[in-house]
Image: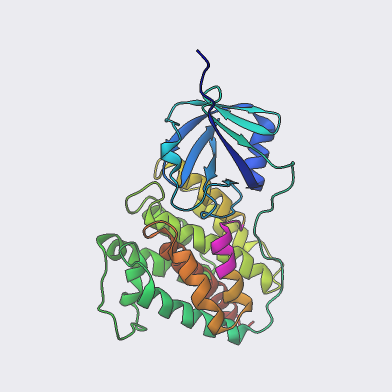
């Protein structure tokens, strides 16, 4: 009897971390199977095989699978072995094969420019705050914005239990960054990491957005000190035993200023764009996961705010 051929996918982009892991090891295992992603464990690190609508990220292998198709229906199960053969990934001896593009064909989103107008960035932050309140999914940590004096009319205040628990440590985190207090940064991070349910808890999603935004905006302001790197190192060093393996991977990337294409696009518009540029980028990010996109946007809001506030308090 002839064995049925497995499913063949073509990868359109390989993120920098995924490329690095694929270059170091030939064997991994499927750790999680979801409609939009297959999570692959290589040693203690992870990368993800994802649908095209998930988008680019340092840890993503983006495949030609359209929105609506489910990777969970491709016959792949947790625990299956995945091998690299040349420029292909072969799952379970051929049940699924992913053909990779040439090495170096992908790119990781990042931002390397200087601020043009800090006052404009403050206006963009105000627009992002309004977008989160009025159109984000506030069942994660987005409701913390209702604990602030800028609550907007038109939507009733709603704070999830996780948001209520996060309100104080998030405020402490932003203030600690602005004041240069690394000990408080560490203490606040310990309260936030792993807060909320899911493979990437809401507290982690906010911190990932915050770290990426803090580092990129700090450099965009032309600051040459390494304070943002030290803040991110303090935050990412608190993950042990507090959160999931996948979320730890995201936080390690964010500490280096790296994130998804959607998050990087929103951050770019917050720093360099105009208020009218914020809405489409924010709503595209909001579509990520259930609350993950909104929480990442909240992190971007807080990270850039902390960066600007640090300069304002120093008179810079």
Instruction: Write the start and end of the magenta stretch as one range.
Output: 257-266
Residue 273 sits in which quadrant? bottom right
Q: Where residue 106 appears, x then y in whole percent? A: 69, 50
Residue 261 sits in which quadrant? bottom right
261 in the magenta segment: yes
Q: Residue at x 54, y 63 (%)?
A: 263
Q: Residue at x 29, y 84 (%)?
A: 154
Q: Where residue 74 appears, x then y in whole percent? A: 45, 35
Q: Residue at x 59, y 64 (%)?
A: 264
Q: Where residue 201 appears, x then y in whole percent? A: 38, 52
| Above or below 54: residue 277 | below
Q: Where residue 199 appears, x then y in whole percent? A: 39, 46
Q: Main secondary structure of the magenta part?
A: helix
Q: Residue at x 63, y 69 (%)?
A: 218
| Residue 217 vs residue 314, the one in the foreground | 217
| Residue 124 vs residue 284, the one in the foreground | 284
């Amino acid at each position: 009897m002839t064995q049925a051929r497995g499913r063949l996918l073509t990868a359109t982009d390989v993120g920098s971390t995924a490329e690095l892991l694929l270059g170091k090891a030939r064997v991994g295992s499927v750790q999680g199977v979801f409609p939009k992603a297959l999570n692959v464990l290589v040693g203690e690190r992870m990368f993800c095989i994802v649908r095209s609508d998930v988008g680019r990220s340092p840890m993503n292998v983006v495949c030609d699978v359209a929105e609506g198709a489910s990777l969970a229906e491709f016959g792949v199960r947790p625990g299956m072995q995945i091998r690299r053969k040349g420029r292909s990934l072969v799952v379970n001896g051929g049940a699924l094969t992913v053909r990779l593009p040439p090495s170096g064909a992908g790119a990781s989103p990042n931002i390397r420019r200087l601020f043009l107008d800090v006052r404009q960035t403050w206006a963009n932050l105000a627009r992002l705050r309004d977008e989160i309140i009025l159109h984000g999914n506030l069942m994660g940590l987005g409701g913390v914005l209702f604990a602030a004096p800028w609550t907007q009319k038109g939507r009733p205040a709603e704070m999830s239990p996780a948001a209520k628990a996060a309100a104080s440590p998030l405020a402490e985190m932003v203030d600690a960054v602005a004041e240069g207090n690394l000990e408080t940064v560490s203490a606040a991070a310990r309260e936030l990491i792993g807060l909320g349910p899911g493979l990437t808890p809401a507290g982690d999603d906010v911190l990932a957005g915050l770290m990426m935004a803090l580092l990129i905006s700090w450099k965009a302001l032309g600051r040459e000190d390494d304070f943002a790197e030290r803040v991110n190192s303090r935050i990412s060093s608190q993950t042990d035993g507090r959160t999931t393996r996948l979320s730890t991977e995201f936080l390690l990337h964010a500490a280096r200023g790296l994130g998804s294409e959607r998050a990087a696009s929103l951050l770019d518009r917050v720093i360099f764009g105009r208020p009218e540029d914020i809405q489409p980028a924010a709503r595209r990010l909001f579509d990520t996961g259930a609350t993950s996109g909104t929480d990442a946007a909240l992190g971007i809001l807080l990270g850039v705010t902390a960066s600007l506030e640090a300069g304002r308090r120093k008179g810079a």
